[in-house]
Image: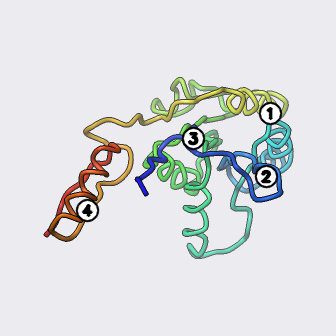
Amino acid sequence: MSPVKVSDEESWPDVGRIGQPPRPKRVFIGFPYKEPYRSLYGNRVREAAAREGWEAVMPLGDVRGGMMLDRIAAMIGGAARAIYDVGADNGNVWFELGITLGLRQPTALTSNVDPRDLADILRSPWLRPYSNDDGCVREVVGFLSLPTAPPIVTPTRSAAAGARVAVIGDGDRTAAVVAALRAAGYDTVEVS
């Protein structure tokens, strides 16, 4: 079996399960879990995403003390795209956005705050400002309807997409595995 690179959303086949329709693509949505954001993203945006063929995933549970960290990381890692409302200072949103940046996922930033009042780093081509709930839904649908969307941090050789693969061993089998991984574009190192 040859290795498969799965670093971009187009490389995931939409095959569904046997006898069932294909699953929708997933979008992770990060926002402050308080009103008015909870109703806006937890209901209206979720419903709009579903109409566009996307499943909106978000950690809406009330688990305290970092117990949701693995669950959140898995949700983000399993999503093809991510959307974060960056209009309110919220440590959870910044943490989740950091995971998304590290994974180099296609991302949109939304905000109902005047862009001039946001930190410089947030005023970017990825920012989709809105003035009311309908505007927020329009911006989200616009992002999800793009055939492809760029990540905020693009893959480069100095900041490669994906981790370096270490192949431990020696001999012909190890050499063959290293050669196959390198041919597939993985940054590979042989350790014997």
Residue 190: give x, y in percent of width and height: 18, 61
Residue 17: give x, y in percent of width and height: 75, 58
Q: Residue at x 73, y 53 (%)?
A: 16
Cα–Cα span, label 4 and label 3:
25 Å
Q: Mark 2 belongs to which amino acid? A: Arg
Verify CB contact (< 8 Å) between mark 2 and mark 1: no
For label 4, count other residues whose C-alpha is less than 10 Å away and answer few (under 14), some (14-19) or many (20+).
few
Residue 70: give x, y in percent of width and height: 55, 69
Find residue 9 and name its label.
Answer: 3
Q: Mark 4 belongs to which amino acid? A: Ala
> N-terminal of the two: label 4 or label 3?
3
Q: Secondary structure at mark 3?
A: helix
Q: Quadrant of the C terminus?
A: bottom left
Find residue 38 and name its label.
Answer: 2
Cα–Cα span, label 4 and label 1:
43 Å
Q: Mark 3 belongs to which amino acid? A: Glu
Q: Secondary structure at mark 1?
A: helix
For label 1, count other residues whose C-alpha is less than 10 Å away and answer few (under 14), some (14-19) or many (20+).
many
Type of colouring: rainbow
Mark 4 sits on what residue? Answer: 166
Cα–Cα span, label 2 and label 1:
13 Å
Verify CB contact (< 8 Å) between mark 4 and mark 1: no
For label 3, count other residues whose C-alpha is less than 10 Å away and answer few (under 14), some (14-19) or many (20+).
some
* Horizontal side of residue 152 vs 184, given as left or right: right
Mark 1 sits on what residue? Answer: 137
> N-terminal of the two: label 4 or label 2?
2
* Horizontal side of residue 47 vs 59, given as left or right: right
> N-terminal of the two: label 2 or label 1?
2
Q: Nearer the viewer, residue 188 or 3?
A: 3
Q: Secondary structure at mark 4?
A: strand
Residue 157: give x, y in percent of width and height: 27, 37
